[in-house]
Image (cartoon, coloured by chain):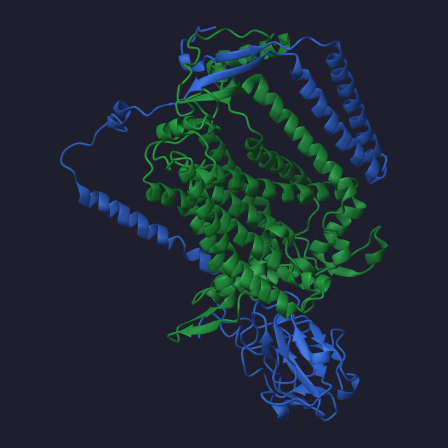
Chain colours: A green, B blue
Amino acid sequence: MTPLFALLFDSLDERLKLRHPSRKVANKVFPHNWSFLLGEVALFSLVVLVATGVFLTMFYRPSTAPVVYHGSLELYDGTTLPGAFESILRLSHDVPGGLLFRRIHRAASHLFIAASVLHMLRILFTGAFRRPREVNYLLGLGLITLAFVAGFTGYSLPYDSLAGTGIRIAYSELLSFPVVGDRVAFWVFGGDFPTGDVIPRFFVFHVMIVPALIIGAVSVHLLLVGRQRHTQFPTHGVDGHAFIVGKPLWPAQFAESATLILWIGGLLTASAVFVPWSDISLLGPYVPGEVGNNAQPDWFMFWIDGALRIFPPLEFSVLGLMTVSGPFVAGIVLPGMVFTGLALYPFLERKVYGLRGEWHVLTNPLDIPLRAAVSLGTFSFVLLLSAAATSDILSRLSGISIEDVIWIFRVACLLGPPVLAAGIYRYSTKRLRSRGLVVATDEQQATSQAGGHGAVPAAVTPPARDPSPVSGGE
Amino acid sequence: MSADGDPKAELRVIARTDPPRSKLNDSIVVLSAGAAALLGVVFAVSLLAGGPMVLYGGALAGGLLLLAVAVRRYFTDRFPDIEAVEPREIPSPDDTDKPLSDVAPLGPRRSLLKRALIAAGGVFGLSLLAPVTSLGPAPGRTFTTTAWARGVRLVTTDGDPVRPGDVAAGGIATIWPEGAIGQERSSVLLLRLSVEPVPPTVLEWVIADFLVAYSKVCTHAGCPVALYRQQDNALFCPCHQSTFNAVAGAVPTFGPAARPLPQLPLGLDEEGYLVALSDFVEPVGPALPRA
């Protein structure tokens, strides 16, 4: 330690008793695998989002009231625009650094959501959700939902032509709730679309409520990882059920994380210099009653948009009391079912295979046929729905009529995922049988089975019991 | 080292390699850190001096990436490479037997009192949800009416009233009720069809044999039905590809919409301008939550 740091630390330690907890934290052991970095990428993207978002908030004006733009962008100079749109043009073209930070914010939002989704898939495929980590898994699903809300409200704030169309569809989705939809829509929007309230409210959601929830939930998410410790992949000669093998937080994990956040900041900035992320000056402001071709939402909403596109016409009254419509089933019920299914899956797997005890060693999804089937089925379904959101573009590019493209997606979404799920279920069941294995019901059995084919010997290397002092720090 | 005596705080090393000290590595650290600092200054100066984004953005990106290299390299041969092991916490049955607190309640259990408190808390908590209803007005007749009424003129987005001759054959125009331009639920498509409309189009609301007006709000998810395919007289929504037959009462022919676009009763006033004869007869836009 440098003398100044030592002096500072000692004087704080006398008052706060920091030495023992710092040692404990610094000595925490972290297992290593590239896929464990996905959550960290999401976390660091969040840091970039907050830092750039604070800057943007200084300039953004949450208003749809008309304002005349006077600034350096000639295309719009002297035109009357919604206040929100105008403030972003000013931020982008008349504030030094404004465009750069706005683009970094936009790029970081894509990375945040993409890394969160990949992180969730890693958890799902490898079984990191198993007992005792179900709570953190559910918290993670909540975080993904919050990330979607943050992404959608952020996409809406510029009030450009695509944003206005997206808000209109969100309004229709709220309206589609049987019995209470009109009330709910009015509570969120403050009146009939497009009210002057919707942008100010989305602003509060985007810069205050949702970030506060995300930061709070991420903190608990990390505390729980610290409390329950990380899972790890099977390691040769190690009883992963009883021991964690890896590198200590200081210096190895610290060095890796510090490097990672700098890499992420640097790459996001570089992308912002070269990629005009969502250039709203090309989209133009939202004008009620107008929408152009290529009306696609952000990529992470594609699956819901795709479901709305391919769902057949449906609108019926139940006992004359309420209306159930296609937008409700495709836009609310279906995504709700996907998320509910993901939330319930850990409990289903435990029940179906009669799993016992705690699980800390990650597994190949092919070793658990149900998990392989459910995750591939769900994932392919969401991907096919996402692809369906590009039906108009696919039709134009391929020359196939839009009707045929939609029908192809209808058939593919209905048949594809079940066929894939059944196929991988059969494959992984056969694979297990050909190796003379069954789905292990507790972790000890899983470890010894793995030893059976040579990956992990059942014999456990006893860890070095006597702590050897580690030199090298100053 | 073990002064605090907590075995959990100790690092149990199972493998250790001391990387060789490398002069080259030292040079990389110094050079990359120095270059990063320089790029930081370039970023600051060019931003202050109003330089181009490529310059200050590039300097910021380059500086961050070089700083990453410096940090990574600093740790490369500064510390031993440690592989350590840590026992997982195995839940012990002794712990689960202990009560959460050492202070136990007095006397016999009084579950009635406990239930009363829980019930009161629940009822009170539900009452606190009442302010949610202040967030928006009661919808009232919002969803069953529009700004159209008997005698209201059709105007363009610029506010000009429209005569039948203003729309060319095969032409399409976005129309608003006079005095409610931009009121999204009242937007209307005025079309001059190239073939004569047939039922279920209401023929007495068709002007000059070919002029017909439909609500522009899609009955699926409320997007503007903005596109007109002249070759098959189809109205097409760019959001979710709902398709409507403009010749036959705008009934849906493909896509997710389940109801026709409502037809606006069209007439002419004494000055020859197009007017509405009444509001829409059918509700406009997406399905309503109650029948």
Is A142 placed left or right of A274 in the picture?
left
| Residue at the (44%, 31%) spot, across then down | A224
Query: In the figure, B13 relative to A91: above or below?
Result: above
Q: Is residue A193 visible?
A: no
Query: In the figure, A25 relative to B16: above or below?
Result: below
Look at the image and tell me in which quarter the C terminus of chain A lies: top right
**Rendered location of residue A272, percent (x, y):** 74, 41
| Residue at the (85%, 39%) spot, across then down | B52
Q: Quadrant of residue B218?
A: bottom right
**Rendered location of residue A247, percent (x, y):** 53, 19
**Rendered location of residue A355, percent (x, y):** 34, 37
| Residue at the (55%, 14%) spot, across then down | B82
Query: In the figure, A383 relative to B235: above or below?
Result: above
* Residue A402 or residue B210, whichever sits in front: A402
Is A102 placed left or right of A8 in the picture?
right
Is B214 placed left or right of A18 in the picture?
right
